[in-house]
Amino acid sequence: MRVIRPLRRLLKHFGLAMLLAGVLAAATEAVYKNALDAQRDRVYAEFQLAAGQHIGTLRKRVEAVLDLQHLLGDHVDVAGAGSAKDFEQISGSLMRVHTFIKAIALADVDNSVTPPLRFPARHVATRAAWPRRGTDLAMEGLQAQEAVQAALRTGAIIATPLLSPEAENGEGIRLFSRAGQHVLGIYMHLSELAQSTLWAGMDPDARNMAFTILDTTTDPRSAPEVYRDTIGDNFETAYVEVIEFAARRWLIIATPTPNHFELAPAASIERQRATGWAITLLAALLVAFLQTRNAVIRDRVRSSTAELAETNRILADTNATLQAEVAQRTASEAALRTSTTLQQAILHSADYAIVLTDTDGIIRVFNPAAENMLGCAADLVVDKRTPIDFINTAAMARMERATGKRGFAAVLDTARGLSTNEPVEVELTGADGRNIPAAVSISPLIDAQDGRITGYLTIASDITHRKAAETRILHLAHFDPLTELPNRSLLGVRLESALEAAGRFEQSLGVLFLDLDRFKNVNDSLGHQAGDALLKAVSGRFQHCVREQDTVARMGGDEFIVVLPELESREQAAEVAERIVEALSAPFDIKGHRLTVTPSIGIAIYPEDGSTADTLIQHADAAMYHAKDAGRNNYQFYESRLSTLVSTRLTLENRLRRALERQEFELYYQPQVDIASGDFIGLEAMLRWNDPDEGPVEPDTFIPIAEDSGLIVPIGAWVLRTACAQAEAWRRKHLIDVPVAVNLSARQFDEASLLDTVAEVLEDTGLPADRLELELTESLIMRNPELTADVLDGAKRLGVMIGVDDFGTGYSSLAYLKRFPIDRLKIDRSFIADIETEPDDAAIAETIIAMAHTLRIQVLAEGVETVGQLRMLRGWACDAYQGYLCSRPLPADDMNALLKGLRAARLCGLPEMGNG
């Protein structure tokens, strides 16, 4: 009892002050925590994005070094060690592009012991005094020796760990690979590689993050440090990626530099917190002062009343009147405690909205922060409106349904204001009609004397920025970042929901599995940036082929899923597939290239083809592969049930047969130009089809069908005969006497009568055999090397020329091509397009030319469009070029006119077209 009585007096005198202090303190800390969390989420997302971009650049540069070592190794494998001058010329061109490569050495293998322990350098290209000719590549220690032996044993590129600064060529790593009977070594300065890649062209003072590279190849727990920036050691915020590099595993750790990506609370947040605590203290002191003053007044009243009662009972009626006046005065002072004048003065600087309501929900206090947030002046709100007026109508309806209450009572129940101060998210509506997401906490104000609830204190903070960040994170989790289509995760949710609705309402549902035909060729020939741009363009066309309730999702790579709920019939799914096929039929303009891509589509229908999401996707996938087997650029239903597209494909096949009979095909010719003299040294024949009813038909559209149907064989025979006849006609008219190049398809090449057909055409047309060049793609040559060698040997016996078309897009190398009797190699246009701006492409093209010349193979560059490209090719001693810089492909009549003009120019002694 001795303890309880003082406690009661304390609560009686200061209970309201303590309660108000607790409410305001909790609100201050809640708002502070929300602001701090939002700041840290934003900083880390920005840092993670920036670090990932820097590390991606480093990964590409490392892969480029490995590609160049492969090319140099192929050169040595093909041409042998060669002379020191040739080796230094080729290696020097690579070192000029990549300055972090300090030396390139080609060493012999001393096989006097097994395994070999010595590898003396035969040729060396270096920026320093070491290594020199005769230097042992393994002399830098056991790690270098083991790396060389591993490269010889596995045939792969093997990197050493980081060698110390005391190593012969300084701190760095060594890359070793087998090159024929030799060892190829590249000496690379890792610090220079990292700095030139991660911080190219950036002032050191402007760097906002630092990188540390650990070599985790052997033991991740004690991984040595191979690179560290001199700034930045804040591991509180870090981003980590792994790069696999030449049998080594690097762990890349990115950390912010000082004063960048800071997680410490911003000054504005700290000021907001300090202001909240100051308001809390002032409010508590004010209420405590008022309570103490009232207690003194009550004591004085009781004392006076007792004295009057004791001294003069006669004045009982007067005393009763006095007590009534004292009670009235006490009530007036209690009302004064609830007035808002002093509270508004104290809370005027708060950054968050503070609203005080009575028990009926009428607003009595509306601070300036609330005015700014909701766009409404206090004099239009106080004593006139309730918080319900600022709650979104839809949000209010949800609260009433959830609580079973109406009006302000539903708001109180939702906010759990009677039991906790934890903020809840509520969508408010400003005076201008805009929606404002807010974190709201509502606390009751309880009278210290009788325990009655006298009103409610509402604290609200604008969380628009936090909600935007959450929305962005949620979007990244459910949408493909490249195409902005739903990803595999969101697809699963939507498909399950659609299946549930279809089962409940006994409806059908369609799943389309789409795969882009030969999309890999785009990545291989034009690069992944062009491939990504094509995927985005394809996704945009998909959106116009479906309804609003349909879902188009990207599974990954070039695979897409379309979900068609509320399907009325199988034909409706077929119509969507037809729209997609038609939408993709128009060429895409990607980075200056006109690309045509076709889809193979498989269709599965719920419920007959499956009742679960996984089953429907698997069956649609199987149907898609059936579509590919059927010739691509079509769709198939599961269980081989074909749609009307089969009839369309058959119609096009019939049109092709009719076109062959009616001679609707035409050949265009594009000149091939000698780079040194500017003279025409050849013409390439290109097939075109102009349908009298439908107009021009793209080769990419009809050639695959011709190949699949076998029509390519008679069409190819027509091309061969027509091109040879035209070339012989020009030769007899003395217009031009150069080889004509004709492409062979895989189906033609597989024909046993191919060589007989070629011999017959040459005999019938009278064209000399050395004036015909047969062009085969790189992939066709490598498909069956034994068959290829037999056919090409037979062709050479006839006397015709052999050319390799689109070199670099397949999987061969010059080391393999030297097995075949090849006269000319055509570098694919994808390697020529960017040689003026991309050092890696330029180095690869230059190396291919040098290596081909070593094998005594002529080189022609395809797709030359600028004078700058021609100038670079001339500097590398490329033999010939073909492209729009000289002429577009022309029909025979236009080419005939061009050749006559050139002949007239020669007879008149005028400069010929193409010279210079």
Image: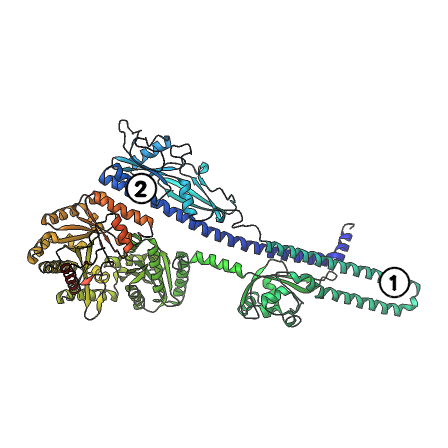
Asked if the residue under mark 2 is in contact with the one under mark 1, i.e. CB atoms within 8 Å, the reply is no
Q: Which mark is residue 92?
A: 2
Residue 262 in the image: state x and y as whole percent: 54, 50
Q: Callout 2, which amino acid?
A: Gly
Q: Report which quarter residue 576 is drawn in.
A: bottom left
In the visual, does 233 lie left or right of 319? left
Secondary element at tag 1: helix
Q: Report which quarter residue 387 is drawn in.
A: bottom right
| Residue at the spot of label 1 | 304
Q: Callout 1, which amino acid?
A: Ser
Residue 706 in the image: state x and y as whole percent: 19, 60
Residue 474 in the image: state x and y as whole percent: 46, 58
Between 141 and 195, the one lying in front of the other is 195
Between 655 and 908, the one lying in front of the other is 908
Q: Report which quarter residue 244 is drawn in.
A: top left
In the visual, does 488 lie left or right of 677? right
Q: Which mark is residue 447?
A: none
Secondary element at tag 2: helix
Is the C terminus in the top left, top right, bottom left or bottom right quadrant?
A: bottom left
Q: Nearer the viewer, mark 1 or mark 2?
A: 2
Q: Residue furthest top?
A: 112
Mark 1 neighbour density, 10 Å: few (under 14) some (14–19) many (20 or more): some
| 815 versus 490 height, above or below | above
Visible in this render: residue 808? Answer: no
Find the distance from the CA under tag 1 to the CA under tag 2: 110 Å
The residue sitting at 72% across, 66% down in the picture is: 339
